[in-house]
Image: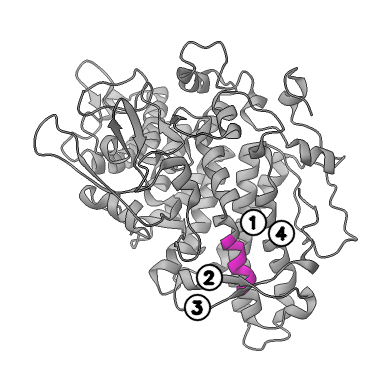
């Protein structure tokens, strides 16, 4: 629940245990219960709570939701083994307000950490002479960005949620608040990110901090994403340019892309990724949903009929982005390395390999599948990387329309496409001469590049919002229905969003259930 009783007067404050590395910085341990106003004395206290904001995002509840909210309803995944009930119900289109994934409390916990820091940190400048205004502003930039990220997840998932910026610090505050309109929340998010732009650090001086903490590139990547969602395409393209201008960001070459980006982590193309370490915080969400070294399959599988191209059998579904037939003479991704690196075909199933593998080694013998090596440690979770920003800009340029914009969009698509298709010819504008053709190309390339990274459902919702209809979204998602009468897509626009949890409605009388779930006879408040 938003409130319930996330009162920080009785919260165990989380303390730093060293600052020599990013994982050590995130190693936070509980101390005895402390009254907050007595706690905020030094910069170390501020940094401890900032660490709690980051650590909160890596908790299982939030990581599970990043995957479930961003992937489950899309055409990327189907049920694997041992799928628990709440996940199964979403996959089969049975979404009710009693589903545990309708709860938003774990995201509001992080929001409350950020709110608390933003409220108390300014007081520390009066108590600790070493905590200067510059230091304060840098910390505020990180907290504002993390809070904006949380609200952006909530808006994309629920459409409207209560917008709270006051910390829960005593029992006299009223946390029964109604939903805030999406326009208002997006406006606040943009405002916070524009403030963060002014003060965010550009370089912490060490790679794991630059990738694991909010930098100016993180701020701009999130802001570009928000502008794209909000159909502010000029601003999206301009903000993407701020990230693309950083010469320290480079796409990893095809040969090393999988191992460097998804196994080692914190690569040259990474912008912001949540840091995991089995000695601090294990990435249980990836293990449970995708698999791990001892059990090479998880509770989710890649969906073969619409997604997976089998490089051994040479077969593909009609909606597959791989081996996609543009014309009688043009085929996209016939030998795309992402089709073997990101998942594997085994025993008739399509197992997700991204995030749980080390490397897929291609065989020199035609028709022999790659050799797959699995990791025995835990994976970071990438929220933004360079190729994502490139394709955001490509999408924005296509929507701005015009021949020049479409040509520039294709140049961006070719950068990510040719990286994974090194022996292929460049995609040519003559084969994508209309806005519609370019739109579907960018959508396919985003799917190919960002498979299983928690992006696909939001990409499809963004498409539906742009078109003012769920028709195209449903053509992708309903391929998973396999002839069943139940639609797995969204019959109306309001159905793209999740219902508000029944427990939230019971705790907060000012909340009103989201419209589609009020009207559906099978789903009650």
Task: Name the residue furthest left.
Answer: 365
Q: Residue at x 39, y 54 (%)?
A: 244
Q: Nearer the viewer, residue 255 or 446?
A: 255
Q: Residue at x 84, y 43 (%)?
A: 508
Residue numbers of the magenta segment: 48-55
Residue 438 image position (x, y, % from top left): 38, 28
Q: Nearer the viewer, residue 488 or 473?
A: 488
Q: CA distance from mark 4 to mark 3?
A: 24 Å
Q: Which residue is mark 1?
A: 147
* Secondary structure state at the residue bearing disc 4: helix
Q: Residue at x 66, y 39 (%)?
A: 100
Residue 229 image position (x, y, % from top left): 56, 39
Q: Which residue is mark 4?
A: 112
Q: Can residue 397 be seen? A: yes
Residue 64 image position (x, y, % from top left): 55, 45
Badge 2 crowding class, 10 Å Cα cut-off, few under 14, some 14 to 19, many 20 or more, is many
């Amino acid at each position: 629940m938003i409130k319930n009783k996330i009162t920080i007067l009785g919260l165990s404050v989380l303390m730093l245990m060293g600052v020599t590395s990013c994982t050590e910085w995130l190693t936070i341990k509980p101390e005895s219960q402390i009254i907050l106003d007595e706690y905020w004395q030094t910069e170390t206290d501020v940094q401890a709570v900032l660490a709690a904001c980051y650590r909160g995002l890596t908790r299982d509840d939030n990581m599970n939701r990043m995957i479930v909210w961003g992937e489950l309803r899309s055409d990327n995944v189907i049920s694997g083994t041992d799928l628990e009930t709440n996940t199964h119900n979403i996959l089969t289109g049975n979404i009710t307000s009693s589903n545990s994934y309708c709860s938003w409390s774990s995201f509001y916990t992080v929001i409350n950490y950020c709110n608390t820091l933003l409220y108390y940190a300014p007081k520390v400048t009066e108590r600790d002479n070493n905590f200067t205004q510059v230091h304060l502003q840098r910390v505020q930039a990180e907290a504002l960005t993390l809070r904006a990220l949380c609200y952006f997840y909530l808006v994309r998932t629920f459409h409207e949620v209560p917008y709270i910026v006051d910390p829960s610090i005593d029992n006299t505050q009223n946390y029964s608040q109604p939903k805030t309109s999406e326009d208002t929340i997006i406006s606040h998010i943009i405002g916070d990110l524009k403030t963060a732009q002014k003060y965010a650090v550009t370089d912490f001086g060490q790679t794991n901090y630059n990738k694991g903490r909010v930098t100016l590139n993180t701020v701009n990547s999130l802001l570009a994403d928000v502008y794209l969602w909000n159909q502010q395409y000029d601003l999206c393209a301009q903000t993407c340019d701020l990230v693309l201008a950083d010469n320290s960001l480079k796409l990893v070459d095809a040969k090393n892309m999988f191992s460097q980006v998804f196994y080692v982590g914190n690569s040259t193309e990474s912008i912001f990724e949540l840091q995991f370490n089995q000695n601090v915080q294990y990435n249980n969400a990836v293990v449970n949903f995708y698999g791990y070294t001892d059990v090479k399959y998880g509770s989710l599988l890649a969906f073969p009929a619409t997604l997976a191209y089998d490089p051994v059998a040479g077969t593909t579904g009609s909606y597959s982005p791989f081996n996609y037939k543009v014309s009688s003479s043009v085929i996209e991704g016939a030998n795309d390395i992402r089709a073997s690196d990101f998942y594997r075909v085994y025993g008739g199933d399509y197992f997700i390999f991204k995030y749980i593998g080390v490397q897929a080694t291609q065989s020199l013998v035609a028709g022999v599948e790659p050799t797959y090596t699995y990791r025995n440690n835990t994976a970071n979770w990438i929220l933004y990387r360079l190729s994502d920003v490139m394709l955001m800009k490509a999408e924005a340029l296509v929507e701005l329309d015009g021949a020049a914009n479409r040509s520039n969009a294709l140049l961006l698509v070719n950068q990510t496409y040719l990286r994974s298709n090194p022996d292929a010819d460049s995609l040519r504008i003559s084969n994508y001469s209309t806005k519609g053709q370019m739109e579907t190309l960018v959508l396919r390339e985003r799917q190919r590049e960002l498979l299983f990274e928690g992006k696909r459902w939001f990409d499809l919702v963004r498409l539906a919002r742009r078109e003012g209809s769920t028709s195209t979204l449903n053509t992708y998602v309903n391929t998973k229905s396999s002839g069943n009468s139940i639609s797995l897509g969204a019959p109306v626009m309001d159905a793209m969003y999740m219902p508000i949890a029944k427990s939230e409605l019971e705790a907060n009388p000012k909340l009103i259930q989201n419209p589609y779930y009020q009207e559906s006879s099978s789903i009650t408040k």
